[in-house]
Image (cartoon, rainbow, N blue to C red):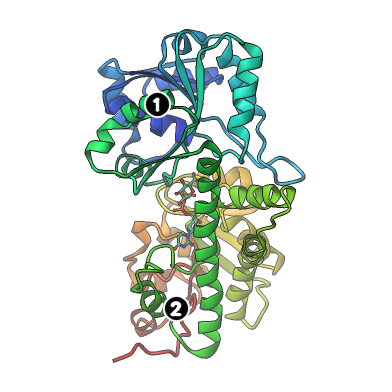
Amino acid sequence: MHITMVGTGYVGLVSGACFADFGHQVTCVDKNVDKIAALRRGEIPIYEPDLDRLVESNARAGRLAFTTDLAEPVAKSDAVFIAVGTPSRRGDGHADLSYVYAAAREIATSLQGFTVVITKSTVPVGTGDEVERLIREANPSADVAVASNPEFLREGAAIRDFKHPDRIVVGVNEPRAKKALTEIYRPLYLNQAPIMFTGRRTAELIKYAANAFLATKITFINEIADLAEKVGADVQEIARGIGLDNRIGTKFLHAGPGFGGSCFPKDTRALIKTAQDFEAPVRVVEAVIAVNETRKRAMARKVAAAFGGSLRGKTIALLGLTFKPNTDDMREAPAIPLVTALQDLGASVKAYDPAGMEQARGELSDVTYCDGPYACAEGADALVIVTEWEQFRALDLPRLKREMACPVIVDLRNVYRSEEVIAEGFRYESIGRSSQNGHGI
Ligand code: UGA
């Protein structure tokens, strides 16, 4: 099938490359001339494991092309995906749909023959209706069906998530669209990935409900972690103890410094706005946002607690800055409020991140960036593990201790076992595991 992917952000680029890998003929379109030129040279604008290889091999095979001109590929496409950004609108938290609507208008005038236009961007309920209205207004004779196909991939595991999804959700209001999307996803269908067809509005809401639920799960375990710390219990064992109940499940129960990223914060905010507009408020999600916001700065107080509450004159070393490992993405990273809170408490901050330091420079001021974990630890009064990159999981603890001015580790991702760090002579603080608390025997 001929597919046009409008937008070459995370979702657009990964989906475009994967559809090409399935054997479809894909053209990715973006208004950003420099980005398209770079992609044509095989340069990938985002950090995503294996994406370079996938783009290169499919481009070489002639199945994947990049252009700034939308009209030509749209005219010959059976399906046009809209995968442009839907950032939080300044001021009110609603999703900003201006890029989606602009894309819809532009697509409309180039359509030829029957085409399915599909929103892959995360869009509030009713956006598909508006996309359809705009297309019909701009081109009344267009033979078009508008569908919704939300994407559930995670940054850092995007290709795996796309090719081995738990499910594919497709919202369609007519059989021809269902047929086209069945054809597009046929390779996954053969892999037995469940494909769920539903109404367009339902599909749109599934995406927000899924992200809000996951954000709620994380926030729930984070609050239980705080309680566990106070009462001398261990949150990791609690997560396992509740997660082994199939109704709960073990995933997304890792306590930490709070969720960040380009999706959960933005999508939970947009969901509460939609819910308020429809007078069906989602109070649980409202609480999740509030708890998560407070948590990020509270992590700085946790560091300060190791020094009696003040960090004046102290040097704090942060390992990891991105909102999670295997990405260079700093959007809404817990590290950002953490750094400002540490500085407000009087600390100097050093940091090292395997991929995020370039982006971090734009977000953070007065931070000394280091070449590696040991250079970062040099002269520090405390080492804080903020993001659980693989390379921080087996640090040479005696070497760290030699580098540091004061042997204190605050592990916000529970990467280490208390006993082993304490045995090396460190003071060790983690999340939801009081340092005195022994494991069961
Ligand atoms: C999330 C969803 O997981 C994807 O399914 C969805 O497609 C995507 O948003 C999106 O809407 O585009 P992503 O933001 O890439 O994916 O990252 P996650 O792996 O979900 O992590 C989000 C945040 O939650 C990170 O800050 C992570 O550290 C935190 N987290 C996650 C925890 O603190 N604990 C956990 O147990 C899991």
Q: Nearer the viewer, residue 180 or 5?
A: 180
Q: Is residue 436 above or below residue 137?
A: below
Residue 76 seen in the figure: yes
Residue 218 falls left or right of residue 93: left
Q: Residue furthest front?
A: 175
Q: Specify the quadrant of the image occupied by residue 137.
A: top right
Q: Residue at x 67, y 36 (%)?
A: 96
Task: Find residue 235 and name its label.
Answer: 2
Q: Residues within 10 Å of mark 2 (few under 14, many from 20)?
A: many
Q: The N terminus lies in which quarter of the figure?
A: top left
* SS for callout 1: loop
Identify the amino acid type marked 1. Glu
Q: Nearer the viewer, residue 421 or 193?
A: 193
Percent position of residue 281, x then y = 69, 57
Q: Residue at x 66, y 66 (%)?
A: 294
Q: How many marks?
A: 2
